[in-house]
Every structure is written in structure tokens, then in C-alpha cells.
Image: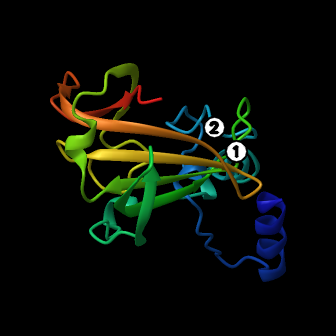
Amino acid sequence: MMVENFIWSLNQLKHEDIMGIYGAAHITMNEEDDYSNLISVPNMATQLTDKFSRKIYTEDLSAKADTSNPWKTGALMINGKEYEAILWNEIWLNRKSNSYDSVEVWELKEGTEDFNNIPVGDRTIPDLSFLFPTEIKYGKIYVLDYYTDDKFKERQIFRSDNKSMDDGSIIARELLYK
């Protein structure tokens, strides 16, 4: 639908340039990207490139975004205890093999010591993941809350610790807290 709307608008202008602003999952042209496992149709840039060839220009502006300010703060209840937290991101998912509609990405402002002795699993989130608009900080707890039809479905908790990627960037590892 987005491609059709873009083409319709372009046709109305008759030989004028037009600009569309889209999320990062839609701007990589004709190549695999970090979002290829999440989208169920070719992204916007790929579809437009197929139609308009060399007339398409894309630019990822995410590096210029102000990521120093969270969306909001709130309280999260984890195992009967309330923690102050920062909401960094809410992502609408369009996964081929997942029933979740969205995920909220929280960082606990306090109580990280409560999670020090919880074992970790194999699942990791690298720094600069599409989930985090800010860099992952050492020694922090990150909470991913998944929703379907605006109803809470699942929570995953991650701890950034001294295990890092080959390039030295910090990763967050899933806590097996259940």
C-alpha cells in the first residue's frame, strides 16, 4: 500500500521530484539488511527501485537522531518488585514467524544488583541492534515486553555484562529468571 500511495502521489505531480520519509527497514535497496528476517514483503526502496531504477535515492538518518532522551519513564513489576525504568523504544513488528505485534524496550534505572546471580541463556542482543536507539551500557538490565493486539504477551530480561562481541562491543544476554 505504501508503494502504491507513493507512485500515485508522484504521478499527480507530473515530472516533479517527491520525497518519502520511511523507517530504516524500508530504505536498503536491492540487498540483504538487518531487517530481512522481520519483513514479510520487499521493503519500500526495493519495490520503488524495481519500478523506477536509478531515480531512487535513500539516506539513513538514524545516526543523526537524538538518542540521549528516552521516550518516557515508568515502573515495571518484575517478580513482585517494582523497578523504575526508562522506555527507549517501541517497535512495531511484522514478523513472518512471530505472533507479536510490538515490543517495548526498557532499561531499569535501579535494582540491577537483584539480577546479578541469575543464570544467562544463549540468546544475546548486540550493541547497535535495531531494538536499541541508544548504545547498550555495561552493567544494565534491559526488559523487552512483547504485545499482541495491545495485550501483554511475554517479557524477556537481558543483562549487559563482561562478555562482548569479537569487536569489543557490549552485548546483552538473556536472563533465565523464570
Sequence-wise first label, 1 or 2: 2
Find residue 164 and report its image quarter. top left
Q: Please provide percent x and percent y for residue 101.
A: 70, 49
* Element assignment for label 1: loop
Residue at the image position 69 percent from the left and 43 percent from the top:
100
Residue at the image position 36 percent from the left and 61 percent from the top:
85
Residue type of the residue flagged with mark 1: Asn
Q: Is residue 49 left or right of residue 133?
A: right
Q: Please provide percent x and percent y for residue 112.
A: 23, 46
Q: Is residue 57 above or below residue 38?
A: below
Question: Would you say the residues marked 1 and 2 are in contact, meaning their CB atoms lie under 8 Å apart?
Answer: yes
Quarter of the image that includes the N terminus: bottom right
Would you name the residue on which mark 2 appears? 38
Separation of marks 1 and 2 at Cα, in angstroms: 6 Å
Q: Is residue 12 visible?
A: yes
Find residue 19 and report its image quarter. bottom right
Would you name the residue on which mark 1 appears? 94
Mark on residue 49?
none
Residue type of the residue flagged with mark 2: Leu
